[in-house]
Amino acid sequence: MSQPAAVTLVEVGPRDGLQNEPSAVSTDVKLTLIDSLADAGLKVIEAGAFVSPKWVPQMADTPEIYRRLEEEGRKREGVSYPALTPNMKGFEAAVAAGVEEIAVFGAASETFSQKNINCSISESLARFEPVIEAARGRFIQVRGYVSCALGCPYEGDIDPNAVAAVSEGLARMGCYEISLGDTIGVGTPASTRRLLDAVKQRVPVDMLAGHFHDTYGMAISNIATALDFGITTFDSSVGGLGGCPYAKGASGNVATEDVVYLLRGMGVETGVDLDKLVDVSAFISSALNRPPASKVAQAVLAQRPKH
Ligand code: HMG
Ligand code: MG
């Protein structure tokens, strides 16, 4: 395995994680979660999505989250709090709430694109163009997601060249980073390799990030494969929270604890304090009334002295 000196972790628990929780999580709990993730050393924390509350009610308090992050002086120096914005309406609401980095989200599957954002892939790119242009005008960085990079809940296998084409489109429009999403967690190291072989022909590897869900337990192996390709940014979710409301059966993102443990074992710097992170995992899991999905968190918690 090749060995970068450091890896950037994009914590997506408060957004990708909580968007798929059936039980309501209060705004106060979300804010405590976001603050404690920053305390644990995460430098990029995706804190919400400016999407239709009819489509994803769990994200309806996103404007309030960002307003309170700003007004209550919760934003930490050196920490970025990106938000998802699917269109100009979302972008304008994000700007009004003081958001300083955004992400647009497309897909490599036509059916998923329709189900998730109610338009075709080419329509989505056309929608993103003014968003990216407006963001650049305000010096707001834009990240681009490509969902269904390793499989679609409706179409099954996805051609890696289709992923490469959408990734290239987003990069050309001005996204500084392209996050390749294994939305339903079906990828394996072999399919991850085929995907990255295709995408790297069209987008430089240092612009790529890996976004793995762990439905089949392959996420950590897929990250190890992506590290071999030179990818050094990974999305993860504390406690393995997450899923996608438009991808039935998909489990959470790879747990941040598991990724930190993998990288710590390799001597790769993440800036994250694993013990503090496990505390955060225990906090949000108990708010959701279940144990953390992360094996690392379970092991660390089991070894702690009982009071
Ligand atoms: P639409 O119905 O086609 O939009 O939805 P529309 O423009 O026709 O507007 C319909 C209504 O929505 C109107 O309200 C608009 O004002 C409102 P009404 O007149 O009916 O009261 N509206 C909005 N409200 C708030 N914020 C907005 C907004 N835009 C329109 N930004 C839309 C299109 C994109 C809005 C909708 O499909 C949507 O919100 N989809 C979001 C789905 C979503 O959030 N999915 C999860 C995130 S993606 C993911 O998880 C994958 C990822 O993790 C990577 C991976 O794992 O692969 C990123
Ligand atoms: Mg996701």
Image (cartoon, rainbow, N blue to C red):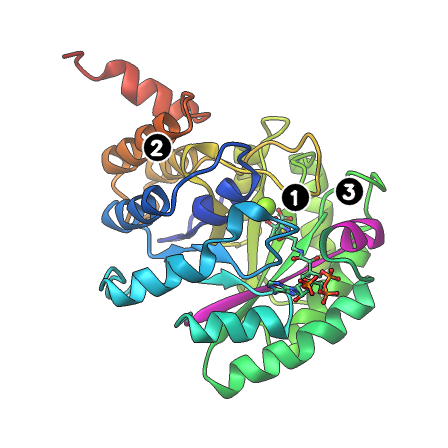
Q: Which of the two discs, 3 and 2, labels the residue nearer the N terminus?
A: 3
Query: Picture coordinates of residue 77 (x, y %)?
Result: 24, 66
Residue 201 vs residue 90, the one in the foreground = 90
User: Which residue: 25% across, 62% down?
Assistant: 76
Give amino acid for label 1.
Asp
Badge 2: residue crowd in 10 Å (few <14, some 14–19, many ≥20): many
- Badge 2 residue CB within 8 Å of ligand 2: no
Looking at the rendered structure, which numbered label has been put on residue 152?
3
User: Which residue: 45% across, 83% down?
Assistant: 139
**Do we see residue 73 in this rendering?**
yes
Q: CA distance from mark 3 to mark 2?
A: 29 Å
- Left or right of residue 53, residue 157 in this image: right
Looking at the rendered structure, which numbered label has been put on residue 281?
2
Q: Is residue 103 magenta?
A: yes
**Does 51 sit above or below residue 39?**
below
Looking at the image, the residue that sits furthest to the left is: 307
User: Tag 1's secondary structure?
Assistant: strand
